[in-house]
């Protein structure tokens, strides 16, 4: 097993490279959007990765590392491509011609500062590997045997601490930055596009991914892979505003949720699920938002919509994105959000209050059950109706497994590992090392 198998995707394995914006740096690696992260009841993702899933496969890998003696020398280009090449494990990139795409990436990047930087990273990695081999070569057989005994002891201790009783959820917005831009500009929906610049991309939509365009790739390489690629300048003020709307929903299920970036978070639903079975059906009922050109058709709909102080009612005749309503009297109204309550200001000067955070269609709704899967489906539904963006989710006994699960049915899907040792082992036994 080469160290590159583990480390090669560390720079672009997230759905969106939010570390470019959130303030992450080597000097400040613990930065978190939600400062409640320190209060989270479960281990951090990195801690879980080391602690919760060390089993037979990991032990065998460690034994292999101890006994491995072979040289894994590769030429410079191949080594660099292990860092910046196509990852076909990512959502939207399955089944692509990896060899062809990597050839284009290599030819487009040679001579660039990006390529030089990747070469430096490759050299640092090679130096680290050589140092480890040198240290390994100095060990005696007795020391190796003692190390294996310590590994076995560590595995037993970790197994004794294994906790499968908690329900951890990883919520991951689908191509978040790109999705926000496509919502605001529908003309982008059917075109390959990416958010970023010629220097670096933050994310790409699924049409662009079919060409191999991904996050943490320079835009000039993306253009080589897909000449029709549209680049959109990032707008982090807008992304933060949408992220806050999403986090508001998640906080209702776990007040101590951990936001890892603008587009992903971990929730511990254990306590919520204990109470969920006692929730009324009404509290588990959520409504669809109004579609474009849809109108209120009866008094029940109207009462849930907008009622002016003069008693006039309103019907939706335009896209809710434009936040416009038309009164039955023919006057128009505009929704403003300058106050805590969303107010409708009529052309006549009268005001009206919007009773919900978005204009709901009272004739179309979903009733969600009490299981973990239903709770997560409810969260995803509410996010979509509120923001018109989709989210994927993973449900598992710990954070690392939840993270892997959220990528299983992307986009707009969810996956759960049952909280049993058998189910966990079956799930991880065939996972690529990169995962």
Image (tube, rainbow, N blue to C red):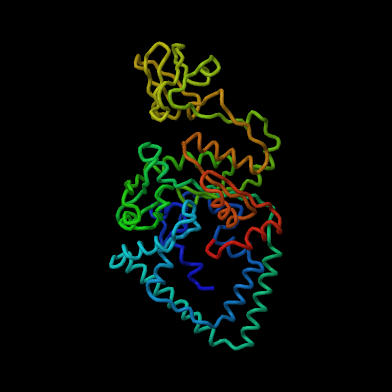
**How many labels were placed on the picture?**
0
Establish if 231 lies above or below 131.
above
Q: Residue furthest left?
A: 111
The spot of residue 222 in percent (x, y) is 34, 55
Q: Residue at x 64, y 42 (%)?
A: 272
**Foreground of the two, 425 or 383:** 425
**Foreground of the two, 415 or 312:** 415
The spot of residue 172 in percent (x, y) is 51, 48
Q: Which part of the image, by quadrant, shows the N terminus?
A: bottom right
The spot of residue 34 in percent (x, y) is 49, 48
Q: Residue at x 55, y 23 (%)?
A: 362
Q: Which part of the image, by quadrant, shows the C terminus?
A: bottom right
Q: Is residue 390 left or right of residue 160?
A: left
The spot of residue 215 in percent (x, y) is 40, 55
Quarter of the image for residue 190 reads top left
Establish if 136 lies above or below 98.
below
Q: Is residue 345 left or right of residue 390?
A: left
**Foreground of the two, 255 or 229:** 229
Q: Residue at x 63, y 49 (%)?
A: 416
Q: Residue at x 53, y 21 (%)?
A: 304
């Amino acid at each position: 097993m080469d160290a590159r198998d583990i480390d090669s995707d560390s720079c672009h394995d997230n759905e969106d490279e939010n570390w470019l914006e959130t303030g992450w740096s080597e000097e400040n690696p613990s930065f978190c959007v939600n400062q409640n992260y320190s209060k989270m009841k479960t281990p951090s993702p990195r801690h879980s990765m080391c602690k919760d899933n060390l089993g037979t496969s990991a032990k065998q890998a460690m034994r292999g590392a101890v006994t491995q003696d072979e040289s894994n020398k590769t030429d410079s280009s191949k080594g660099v491509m292990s860092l910046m090449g196509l990852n076909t494990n990512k959502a939207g990139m399955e089944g692509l011609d990896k060899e062809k795409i990597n050839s284009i990436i290599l030819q487009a990047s040679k001579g660039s500062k990006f390529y030089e930087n990747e070469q430096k990273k490759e050299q640092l990695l090679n130096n680290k590997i050589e140092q480890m081999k040198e240290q390994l070569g100095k060990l005696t057989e007795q020391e190796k045997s003692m190390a294996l005994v310590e590994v076995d002891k560590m595995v037993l201790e970790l197994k004794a601490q294994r906790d499968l009783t908690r329900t951890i959820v990883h919520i991951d917005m689908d191509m978040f930055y790109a999705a926000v831009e496509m919502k605001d500009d529908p003309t982008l929906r059917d075109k390959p596009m990416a958010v970023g610049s010629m220097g670096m991309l933050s994310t790409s939509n699924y049409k662009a991914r079919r060409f191999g365009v991904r996050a943490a790739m320079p835009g000039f390489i993306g253009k080589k892979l897909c000449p029709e690629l549209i680049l959109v300048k990032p707008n982090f003020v807008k992304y933060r505003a949408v992220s806050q709307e999403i986090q508001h929903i998640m906080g209702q299920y776990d007040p101590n949720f951990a936001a890892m970036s603008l587009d992903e978070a971990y929730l511990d639903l254990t306590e919520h699920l204990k109470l969920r079975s006692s929730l009324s059906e009404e509290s588990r009922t959520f409504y669809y938002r109004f579609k474009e050109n849809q109108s209120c058709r009866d008094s029940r709909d109207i009462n849930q919509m907008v009622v002016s102080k003069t008693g006039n009612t309103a019907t939706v005749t335009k896209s809710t994105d434009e936040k416009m309503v038309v009164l039955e009297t023919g006057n128009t109204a505009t929704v403003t959000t300058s106050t805590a309550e969303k107010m409708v200001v009529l052309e006549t000067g009268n005001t009206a209050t919007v009773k919900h955070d978005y204009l709901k269609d009272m004739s179309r709704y979903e009733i969600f059950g009490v299981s973990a899967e239903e709770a997560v489906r409810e969260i995803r539904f509410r996010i979509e109706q509120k923001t018109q963006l989709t989210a994927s989710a993973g449900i598992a006994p710990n954070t690392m497994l939840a993270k892997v699960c959220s990528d299983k049915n992307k986009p707009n899907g969810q996956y759960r590992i049952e909280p049993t040792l058998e189910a966990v082992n079956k799930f991880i036994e065939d996972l690529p090392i990169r995962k």
